[in-house]
Image (cartoon, rainbow, N blue to C red):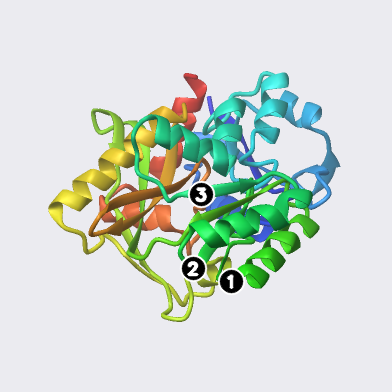
Amino acid sequence: MQTIVGVLRGGPSREHEVSLATGATMLKNLPGDRFIARDIYIDRKGQWHDRGRVSTPERVARQIDVALIGLHGEYGEDGGVQKTLERFGVPYTGTDSFGSYLAMHKLMTKVRAQEIGVLTPAFQHIGKLEESEPLVHEIIRSFHQPVVVKPIGWGSSVGISIVGGYAAVLATVQELFAQGAASVLVEEYIRGKEATVGVIERLRGEEVYSLPPIEIIPPADDFFSYTAKYSGATREVCPGNFSRVANEELQLLAKKMHHALGLKHYSRSDFIVTSKGIYYLETNTLPGLGDASLMPKALAAVGIPLPDFFTHLLNLALKR
């Protein structure tokens, strides 16, 4: 008997278009002999659609066996859609609602990394707009310039800037609040090689299997920003040009953060490799899987076809 899979894509986040690409990849690569794919589109207002018709989460839940989540950003990765699926008893791929919320909250993720002894850039949290002026003064005194300014709870590098000086940092922080950021994180800027490492549970005889680290080489005048990620201007080398020691440490750290955050099925963690050590940045619980995304490149490098990967995720979800 074939399993009915609801492929959730779109969503009311700033990563709507990225999610559509991930969802398209999922729909294209689900093995038809085992699964019946149902295209579940969630529009920018949060309305669910089943095969082009307006629907509700409850109706969708009654008609599918398992959900393959292709959402990114708010609602998709912060535990929102997971809570909905849990409420209606639908198995789904990826991390549960609590782990999703924890990993999406950049401050809590960094605190967790510190608790287990993982190196991460120094940071200052700005919890509300009214705190921004005095805290930015403190940041300018404490951190070398420029610094990294990022919103709590947004993904795909949306809203991240590298700026220096009191006026520029303050304006950037205030603009993020104006755009709806719940709070803002300011980090020291670490120069080094950017790397990302995907991990998958219960694969090839390992409890957590690590894919080869990817080296990310953004344009000389940019960092791995949202534009650099999806414009094609960034080089992505897999396996990356890292020493054997750095390569092994990256894989170990990705597994360590997957465990520490209580994640499920798969994840992808981002790092900066320097001569002083490897700095952990953040973890993606639902990394992009579109044609331009990083995870498919790492899967291809170790000979894992996408249909096999999605089958594996669905098997994990059904055994949850």
Q: Secondary structure at mark 3?
A: strand
The residue indicated by pointer 3 is: 123
Residue drawn 21% across and 59% down? Answer: 242
Q: Sequence-wise, which precedes: disc 2 or disc 3?
A: 3
Q: Secondary structure at mark 2?
A: loop
Residue drawn 84% across and 49% down? Answer: 45
As drawn, the residue found furthest toward the bottom would be 221
Cα distance between the residues tagged 3 and 1: 16 Å
Count of all numbered marks drawn on residues in the image:
3
Labels 3 & 1 near each other (Cβ < 8 A): no
Reply above or below: 150 against 65: below
Labels 2 & 3 near each other (Cβ < 8 A): no
Q: Sequence-wise, which precedes: disc 2 or disc 1?
A: 2
The residue indicated by pointer 2 is: 145
Q: Amino acid at mark 3?
A: Phe
The local crowd at label 1, few if under 14, some if 14 to 19, many if 20 or more residues have their Cα within 10 Å, is some
| Residue 318 x/y as whole percent | 51, 22
The local crowd at label 2, few if under 14, some if 14 to 19, many if 20 or more residues have their Cα within 10 Å, is some
The local crowd at label 3, few if under 14, some if 14 to 19, many if 20 or more residues have their Cα within 10 Å, is some
Residue drawn 38% across and 41% down? Answer: 308
Left or right: residue 85 versus residue 140 is: right
Image quadrant assignment for residue 2: top right
Q: Amino acid at mark 2?
A: Gln
| Residue 126 x/y as whole percent | 66, 48
Residue drawn 70% across and 41% down? Answer: 75
Labels 2 & 1 near each other (Cβ < 8 A): yes
Q: Amino acid at mark 1?
A: Gly
Cα distance between the residues tagged 2 and 3: 13 Å
| Residue 253 x/y as whole percent | 31, 40
The residue indicated by pointer 1 is: 165
Instruction: Answer whether residue 142 is visible to the viewer in this image.
Output: yes
